Image (cartoon, rainbow, N blue to C red):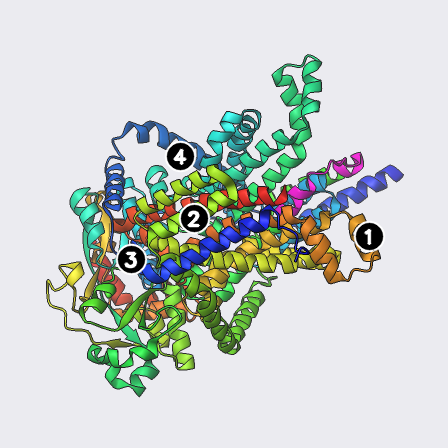
């Protein structure tokens, strides 16, 4: 009787949480379908209509409003000039020539040389191979258009982002103000601001660049701020005690120490910019995204895949170069000069001779890639549908439907109460207040029930992401070889435009919430897996060896030692997994998820639903903020 | 002596390099543009539209020597472009009374440029195998009889009526309610979702009923059958909540920016006179969608085979 020791704090809390959920279930049975605040797909609230009228008013006054004439137009001009200039250099016929200034050979030469200088010869080889591959795919010009736009967006992101990041790193107040703005920029679905952007900055490179940088600048700001903050206090104090001014401390101490992390921010910005390629194509951004979007009108998976693969290749090359650039290296003088010489020759040739300017069309592998991808897709669609259909029905019945029924068919005040109570238990008063505010905002958007349906799917997707994350992450964390093989696949999952794999997914799982969930998992799982793999690897080898020496099996070592010690990584993975899943809500709306995702898509497609689409976008942001703060609070509690 | 040898080798090498260097940039002249100026043509994202745009662009470029800039945009963004001067013409418009009201009546930045000659139809469609095995399904009165067959994981205990891209007006939710059908509208959210559903349904003999439209390139591949709804009469769709009749037939038309129309250049004349038939469009759409031809090549093929039609568009210029 006495043998059972009194459970400490955590289990008691678990009991209370259990009790809350039980009470919820009972009340759900009693109050089902009362006060669920539904709204038909084509119905709108006064708020939605009001947003419409604002949007119309802005459009109507575009040509007379001084803000447009002297502010937005100037920004547009500068960005347009910049992008067009980069395109003229490497992508588009320019300066009266039928080809760009620098042809393929020159671009390959420059890419190789820059990689050699910042990242070493291995990566340089990869860069050369990658760029030649783009040409072989038959997508040279499209790739260069995409590269131009990405580079322009990244350069502008960094010009804005690094100074802002430094400011947020130095000032707590700036940081507090910026964080929610950055959250907003990263989780607000692009579809919501795509149409207004073309109103402000017209159709063209400027709008596409700005759409990209809204999504791509936040990582640069966040990571720079984080880098500045992580410089050890005593280093800064030492510098100050030696009489350095603030500026000197910043330039001589803070920035050099933070350099490595800031380069990682550059890396994340590039990846984020590349993930916008297809969406920007919806407002006529030139490049690979257009190829993907166009191919999908005729469900030509082969062509879409080929272009998607080119985006993946670009992403992997740029990722490896920037990652390797975090290490300091010095090149022998002779290598530097001969590299410079060779690059100069390639650039000259590509300027002068046609064969070096336009990628020869005789050698190509694009058509084989297209045929291969089409064949694989057709095979999968023909032979797997029975299996996949059954799996979809099972998951829908066992997981999605019950969760959705509980969230979307309970009265809103009941769900609100449960959310606030759980937040209080997990994160205290502060967390409860944030959640209460978020719940209030969700009700105010007029899209409560849609939000709950989306929340249910989001939770299911996150659970699947975490299962995959733990299984594959542990495997990769324990085996270097597995890591080497799997990591490029994960990279591909992150940057391959979702539109490419949606077509076969639709054949396998039909238009359904489950299809949307799977698409989200493909996008979000790589992040979770990478974080967990790194966490597992960071567990000190001595601890693992000790455990093995004591006779633990692999299973015991994983469950008793590695996973518990990597719980910081686990919670971070859950948090990032959630945010990435939420960023796929709109894509889900394109394949049958309905709810908030569909509302946003409809708002982009029909002008009279614009206000509702915007409200749905806000609801997604609010869900994101709420879940983010909740998981962070839970993480703090669990890891301390 | 040795020095001379080295110099000689370098010279020979350089000569050899430039010798096998091949054609130089600028050896051949690039295409010239005429006096027609720039023609900004919006390209909305479906193949039928692409067919119209490809043929118009081809004729404008080859015959009128215009510099055609195609801009790939969704309808909403394209119409917005009339006001900002970024778009001259939209050459296949499906109704869009909301956009008409906003840009033609209120902002007065756009005007209609007449019919394209293509008739559009919206409605509920089933795959051909289903229409063959259960011919009575083509009458809406019998739909409830089959509701159970159309159940999916998304529709609960009702039949699923699949809707697609939200760009087009749909009355489906009201229709289901007002015709007392035991169905639930499931929003696929994209044309891709619809096409995959119908393809899969025809191949595996699955039960699918969904919102679709013609002309559409898929109909060349699978002859979907239209379900008959209560007949459309003018005004029966006036109140969106109470609609209980079929969709009207659409006379697909062209919309141009006011500025473009007022300037009355050759490109505008071409757009105004452009008129063809559903079959014409289907032919070009088939070249693009099934034969995987580039839009320019597809347009060239059609224009070369239909010189008389093209001439008629140019006659009044």
Spatial separation of the CA atoms under disc 1 and disc 4: 62 Å
Q: Which residues are magenta?
A: A317-336
Which residue in the rendered view is the most extreme toward the right?
B1
Residue A625, image quadrant? top left
Q: Is residue A456 above or below residue A85?
A: below
Reading the image, the residue beneath label 4 is A76
Asked which secondary structure carries label 4, the reply is helix
User: Callout 3 environment at 10 Å: few (<14), some (14 to 19), or many (20+)?
Assistant: few
Image location of residue A456, percent across then percent down: 43, 57
Q: Of marks 4 and 2, which one's residue comes earlier in the chain? A: 4
Image location of residue B125, percent across then percent down: 29, 74
Q: Is residue A188 left or right of residue A199?
A: right
Judge by depth and name the residue closer to the eye, B111 or A558. A558
* Badge 1: chain ID: A
Q: Of marks 3 and 4, which one's residue comes earlier in the chain? A: 3
* Badge 4: chain ID: A
Does the residue at mark 1 contact the one at mark 2 (Cβ under 8 Å)?
A: no
Q: Of marks 1 and 3, which one's residue comes earlier in the chain? A: 3
User: Callout 1 environment at 10 Å: few (<14), some (14 to 19), or many (20+)?
Assistant: few
Reading the image, the residue beneath label 1 is A546
Does the residue at mark 2 contact the one at mark 3 (Cβ under 8 Å)?
A: no
Q: Is residue B145 above or below residue B240?
A: below
Q: Is residue A428 left or right of residue B295?
A: right
The residue shown at (27%, 63%) is B310
Number of numbered discs overlaid on the protein picture? 4
Asked which secondary structure carries label 1, the reply is helix
Reading the image, the residue beneath label 3 is A34
Q: Quadrant of the N terminus of chain A?
A: bottom right
Q: Quadrant of the C terminus of chain A?
A: top right
- Is circle 3 on the same chain as circle 4? yes
């Amino acid at each position: 009787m006495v043998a059972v020791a009194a459970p400490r704090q955590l289990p008691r809390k678990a009991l209370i949480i259990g009790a809350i959920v039980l009470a919820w279930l009972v009340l759900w049975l009693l109050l089902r379908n009362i006060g669920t605040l539904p709204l038909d797909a084509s119905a709108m609230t006064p708020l939605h209509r009001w947003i419409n009228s604002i949007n119309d008013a802005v459009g109507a006054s575009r040509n007379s409003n001084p803000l447009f004439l002297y502010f937005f137009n100037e920004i547009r001009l500068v960005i347009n000039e910049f992008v067009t200039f980069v395109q003229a250099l490497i992508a588009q016929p320019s300066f009266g020539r039928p080809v760009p200034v620098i042809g393929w050979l020159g671009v390959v030469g420059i890419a190789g040389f820059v990689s050699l200088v910042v990242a070493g010869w291995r990566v340089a080889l990869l860069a050369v191979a990658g760029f030649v591959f783009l040409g072989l795919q038959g997508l040279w010009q499209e790739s260069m258009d995409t590269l131009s736009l990405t580079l322009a967006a990244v350069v502008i992101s960094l010009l804005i982002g690094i100074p802002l990041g430094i400011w947020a790193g130095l000032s707590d107040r700036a940081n507090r103000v910026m964080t929610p703005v950055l959250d907003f920029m990263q989780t607000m679905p692009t579809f919501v601001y795509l149409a207004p952007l073309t109103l402000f900055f017209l159709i063209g490179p400027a709008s596409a660049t700005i759409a990209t940088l809204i999504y791509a600048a936040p990582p640069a700001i966040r990571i720079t701020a984080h880098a500045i903050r992580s410089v050890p206090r005593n280093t800064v104090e030492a510098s100050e005690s030696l009489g350095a001014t603030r500026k000197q401390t910043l330039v001589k101490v803070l920035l050099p120490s933070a350099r490595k992390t800031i380069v990682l921010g550059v890396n994340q910005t590039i990846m984020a910019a590349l993930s916008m390629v297809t969406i920007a194509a919806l407002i006529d951004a030139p490049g690979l995204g257009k190829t993907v979007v166009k191919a999908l009108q005729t469900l030509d998976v082969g062509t879409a895949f080929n272009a998607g693969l080119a985006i993946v290749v670009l992403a992997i090359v740029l990722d490896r170069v920037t990652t390797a650039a975090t290490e300091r290296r010095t090149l022998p003088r002779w290598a530097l000069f001969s590299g410079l010489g060779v690059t100069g020759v390639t650039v000259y040739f590509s300027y002068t001779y046609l064969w070096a300017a336009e990628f020869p069309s005789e050698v190509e592998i694009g058509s084989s890639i297209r045929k291969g991808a089409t064949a694989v897709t057709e095979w999968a669609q023909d032979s797997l549908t029975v299996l996949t259909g059954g799996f979809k029905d099972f998951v829908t019945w066992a997981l999605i439907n019950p969760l959705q029924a509980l969230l979307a068919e309970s009265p809103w005040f009941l769900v609100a109460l449960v959310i606030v109570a759980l937040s209080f238990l997990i994160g205290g008063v502060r967390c409860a207040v944030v959640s209460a505010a978020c719940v209030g905002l969700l009700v105010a958007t007029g899209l409560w029930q849609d939000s709950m349906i989306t929340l249910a799917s989001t939770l299911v997707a996150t659970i699947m992401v975490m299962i995959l994350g733990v299984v594959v992450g542990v495997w990769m964390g324990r085996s270097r070889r597995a890591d080497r093989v799997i990591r490029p696949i994960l990279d591909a999952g992150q940057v391959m435009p979702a539109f490419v794999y949606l077509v076969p997914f639709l054949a396998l799982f039909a238009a359904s919430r489950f299809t949307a969930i799977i698409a989200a998992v493909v996008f979000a799982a790589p992040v979770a897996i990478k974080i967990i793999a790194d966490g597992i690897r960071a567990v000190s080898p001595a601890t693992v060896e000790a455990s093995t020496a004591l006779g633990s099996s692999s299973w015991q070592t994983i469950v008793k030692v590695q996973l518990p010690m990597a719980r910081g990584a686990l919670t971070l993975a859950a948090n990032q997994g959630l945010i990435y899943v939420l960023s796929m809500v709109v894509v889900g709306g394109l394949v049958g998820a309905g709810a908030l995702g569909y509302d946003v898509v409809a708002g982009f497609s029909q002008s009279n639903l614009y206000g509702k689409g915007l409200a749905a976008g806000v609801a997604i942001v609010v869900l994101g903020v709420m879940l983010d703060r909740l998981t962070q609070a839970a993480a703090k509690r669990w890891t301390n | 002596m040795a020095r001379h040898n080295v110099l000689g080798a370098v010279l020979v090498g350089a000569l050899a390099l430039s010798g096998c260097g091949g054609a130089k940039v600028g050896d051949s002249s690039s295409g010239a543009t005429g006096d027609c100026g720039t023609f900004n043509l919006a390209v909305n994202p479906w193949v039928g539209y692409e067919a119209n745009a490809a043929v118009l662009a081809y004729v404008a470029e080859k015959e009128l020597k215009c510099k055609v800039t195609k801009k790939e945009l969704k309808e909403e963004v394209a119409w917005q472009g009339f006001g900002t001067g970024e778009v001259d013409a939209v050459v296949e418009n499906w109704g869009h009374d909301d956009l008409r009201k906003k840009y033609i009546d209120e902002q007065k930045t756009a005007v209609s440029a007449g019919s394209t000659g293509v008739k559009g139809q919206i409605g509920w469609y089933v795959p051909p195998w289903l229409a063959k095995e259960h011919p009575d399904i083509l009458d809406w009165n019998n739909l409830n009889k089959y509701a159970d067959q159309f159940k999916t994981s998304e529709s609960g205990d009702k039949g699923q009526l699949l809707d697609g891209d939200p760009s087009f007006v749909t009355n489906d939710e009201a229709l289901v309610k007002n015709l007392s059908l035991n169905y639930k509208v499931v929003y696929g959210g994209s044309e891709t979702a619809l096409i995959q559903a119908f393809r899969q349904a025809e191949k595996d003999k699955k039960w699918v009923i969904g919102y679709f439209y013609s002309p559409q390139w898929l109909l060349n591949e699978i002859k979907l059958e239209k379900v008959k709804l209560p007949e459309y009469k003018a005004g029966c769709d006036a109140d969106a909540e109470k609609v209980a009749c079929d969709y009207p037939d659409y006379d697909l038309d062209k919309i141009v920016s006011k500025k473009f129309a007022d300037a009355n250049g050759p490109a505008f004349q071409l757009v105004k006179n452009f008129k063809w038939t559903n079959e014409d469009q289907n032919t070009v759409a088939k070249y693009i969608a099934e034969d995987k031809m580039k839009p320019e090549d597809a347009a060239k093929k059609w224009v070369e085979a239909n010189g008389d039609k093209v001439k008629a568009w140019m006659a009044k210029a």
